[in-house]
Every structure is written in C-alpha cells, then in structure tokens.
Amino acid sequence: MSSIVTGEAVVLELRPASFAARALSSIIDVTAQFIVLLGLLLLFGQTLGESVDPALGQALILTIVVLVLIGVPVTVETLTRGKSLGRLAMGLRIVRDDGGAVRFRHCFIRGMAAVLEIYMSAGSVAFIAAMFNERSKRLGDMMAGTYAMRERVTAPVPNQVQMPPWLRGWAHLADMGRFPDALSRRVSRFLSQASRLSAPARAARAAELADEVSAFVSPQPPPGTRAEDFLSAVTAERRDRDYARMSRQREHTERVSRRLHRLPFDQ
C-alpha cells in the first residue's frame, strides 16, 4: 500500500494492483482487441477486399490495426479516467503517481509504449518490467508516471477521529500550521491503532506525538488537556478545514466553468 499526503497533510492510502491482477487484466484487454481486430479484418476482406486497389487495401488494413490497437484503447482509457474492459473486470484503474486521474497525455504515452512492450514482444517486455517493479509498472507506466490501483478492496472498518466536545471552541480558533508528512502519518497511525496499545504505551506515545505537534499549533490547548484528546482535536479540525477548502475550490471551479460556458464563441 502506498501513501499520498495532500497539501493539508491528509493521508490517503492507495493500493497498487498486484502483478497477477495486472497481467490478467492485460490478457483480457489484448484478447478483446484481437477478437475485434480479427472481426473487422474478416469483414473488410469479405466486403471490400477484392474491389479496392491493393495499395489502398493495405493502407486501410494498417489504419484498422492502428485504430484497434492504439486509438480505441487510448480513447477509452482517457474517457473513463484509467479504465478498460480488463481493468473493469479486475477492479483496477490507472492513476498518476500522485494518485490523480490520468489524462490524454498519460494514456497516449502508455498506448504508444504498448506497441513495443505488449504487441511486438508478445508481452515479454512488459512482463519483465512489471515483475521487478514494486508497483508492477510496465515501461509505459514508467514513462507516463502512472500505475494501476486496486479499486475493489475489502473496505476496512472506518476509524473516524472525533472532535472532543470540550476542545471544539479552542480548535476552531487555533492556528494550525502544516505538519511534516512523516509526522502526519505517525499521528494518523497512532490514532487508528491506539486501542490496541497497553495503557502505559498509549499514554507515552500520545505524549511524545503531542509534544511534536504542539510546535505547529498556537495557542496551546487548555491546561490539563490529555495528549490523546489534543491529537484527536487537531486531526479532526484539520480534516474539517481540508474538506471545507476542497469544497470551496470545487464550487469556484464550477462557477468558472459555468461562466465559460455562457461566453459567446467567436464567429
């Protein structure tokens, strides 16, 4: 599992697809492509094969091959943000290395690389590259900066950090700077695993983390606040602020988009 830390230090856990899952999804995709390609070539041979010039026929056949093996996969992957028939069946999606949705540029690079590493080499190049990569990346993924992520996973029991009611007023007014990514991960991991620790270890670990976090928070919490309550309050408040920030950004983007749609096009 890989961790992506947002600008507000919110940790997102992403699960790279296994080598076996990627291989099986690729086999499904390639098989479907060759079935479609064979069907189109047979249809072309039966309808136009004898009535067109040989040079034109070769050009048309090459066009069909390029469209089926490159054009269609790139288009489908772009429109579905990283999906394909095989990935849909296996519950996978192609994403950028930072966890974001892929765009045409990423899909085009992957599609062009597939000509060499999948079709021309019968998949051997992609197989070797993916075997020795921790995210099962093929060469196209390495060049495009993408990897396959598992979407269908067993959902863990959510561990929603709650804001201690007696600290809500203080947390809303407190100034909370950005934490180092490593510290954010350690706090998140502690709060999710605290119930499994012994009482002395839990208190000691909470005090250690609270001491680090307090350097990024002003003013300090009310006297007598437990270290674990302090960590919960900071985490919950930062989560709520992050959600509010993203909501504002989405609303702003939608407003700009609506304004652009209303603008008259140049004649």
Image (cartoon, grey):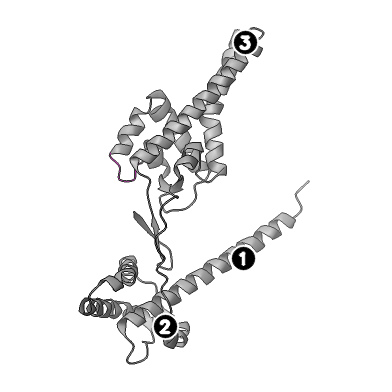
The location of residue 107, given as percent across then percent down, is 49, 40
Dot 2: element: loop
Of label 3 and label 2, which has the lower sequence position? 3
Left of 28 or right of it: where is 207? Answer: left
Q: Residue at x 35, y 78 (%)?
A: 231
In this rendered view, identify the residue nearer to me: 201 or 179. 201
**Mark 3 or mark 2: which is in front?**
2
Of the numbered discs 1 and 3, the one sitting upstream in the chain is: 3
Query: Which circle, 2 or 1, is nearer the viewer?
Result: 2
Residue 101 locus on image (x, y percent): 49, 50
**In the foreground, 222 or 182:** 222
The magenta stretch is 132-136
| Quadrant showing the N terminus | bottom left
- Name the mark on residue 49: 3
What residue is disc 1 on?
251
Work out whether residue 48 can be spotted.
no
Classified by dominant secondary structure, the portion drawn in magenta counts as loop
What secondary structure is found at the residue carrying circle 1? Answer: helix
Disc number placed over residue 164 in the picture, else none:
2
In this rendering, the answer to whether 145 lies above or below 29 is: below
